[in-house]
Amino acid sequence: MTSDAHLLDRRPGGSGGAIRMPLLSDLVSIEAVFVLFIFAGRYKALPELQIFPVDLTVAFMLATLGLVALAVAAGTLRLPPQDTQTLLMGAFAGVVCTSVFWSSLEWANTDKIWRFVLLTLPTFYIALMLGRDVVRRRRLLRLIIWFSIALLAYYMVHRWVLGTTGVDAPTGRFAGNNYLEYGAHANILFIACLSVALAGARGGAGPAVAGACLSMFLLLAIGGRGPLVFALLAVPLAVLGLILRLHTNLLRLRRVLVLAAVLCGLGGVAYGVVLHLGEQNEASSQMLTLQRAQLQLSHEGTYSLDVRGQARGYAFRQWLERPIFGWGIGEFRVQHSLDYPHNLLLELLMEVGLAGAFLFFAVCVAGLGRCAAAARQGMDDWTVATIALLYVTELLSHLTVQGYLGDDRIFFAYLGLALCLPGGAGRPHAHPSMRAWT
């Protein structure tokens, strides 16, 4: 494998990562189109992109499928392996599609099944295909990071340079996007920096810590409490991964502990600003996440979490009435004012019952096993660490406060990538061809 295919990749014979600029080939690749597809919801509502006459999600979905088909025909990309995980996911898709026939057969049911079949499910299989090729997997990670940097730069320019007002209270949107979407990409950038700090070369640890601190500032300022919580959770998860092979990871463990100490100091200063300087202070007014957390703890602004808690309670009660096969795909949206209960486990139990939930989470558990196996092999590859942390934190988020099967492309892509991590049977491989479009 040639060294110019890497960013933050290991030098031959070295023990860490060296920062390299991405190649132009990254931007003209299947992986680039795939990233634009899975993250289309994060940018297509931006005011500057309203000139496009077609839906960008559909456009990049068709482009991705077309390029994948050409690559398979050319022999530079392999079809997903016919292993237990892919068969379980296929069985899950079968249960989901069949469940529409015992649903109410209203627009909400058919809309969700089409979204799942056309937009969500393919991302799992495409990620499996790309993730098995080490070069493509690393390119995909690089592009996700650069996309996150670009979106966060857009946010920072509009909020602090152009002086655009903050989050709109009724809609929760800022410059075309929900604040949670910007927070999610600050979370991605934080986890990537954490992984470089733990698995990269010594020379890259300093910039990685600086990047993690900047990401944490954004997480404290953007307003999304969930992305902040799960970014912080990535630190003890990284420590747990290092402990699985402690005798070779003492230096990396020390790096993570230093980073954790720096972040604790940063968080303490930020909290002190909000708590002691008052909400009218200019610095305090920028910490929207901490302000929202403070309102929740003081019971002054609990509506957001209260209504989601009620939705989760409703989903659980409805599941108890039809525990085996559920009410049918999309039925929560038919019966409740919210589109989904903000908990993928309860969503699946309520709509497709134990039959569907068991099949899906069996695949998720297999992904967890592959992450643990990769950690036991040694956390010496920043891309492996990044994928593992992104997948595990997203899984925990979907088990608690997140999830919508109809538009969950990002999580399904992370799941596919996690199943490609080294450490078990069917290890990833690199194709001899390096052509970007094929």
Image (cartoon, rainbow, N blue to C red):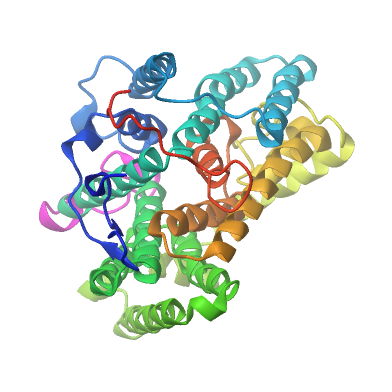
Tell me: residue 150, above or below residue 105. Answer: below
Q: Is residue 185 left or right of residue 230?
A: left
In the image, residue 225 lies at what x, y percent? Answer: 46, 61
Q: Residue furthest left?
A: 162
Most foreground residue, 151 or 386: 386
In the image, residue 368 lies at what x, y percent? Answer: 63, 53
Which image quarter: residue 425?
Answer: top right
In the image, residue 145 lies at what x, y percent? Answer: 31, 49
Residue appearing at x 66%, y 54% in the figure: 369
Residue 328, can we see it?
A: yes
Tell me: residue 14, above or below residue 23. Answer: below
The boundaries of the magenta stretch are: 158-178
- The majority secondary structure of the magenta stretch comes to loop
Tell me: residue 357, above or below residue 390. Answer: above
Which image quarter: residue 306?
Answer: bottom right
Residue appearing at x 56%, y 56% in the figure: 392
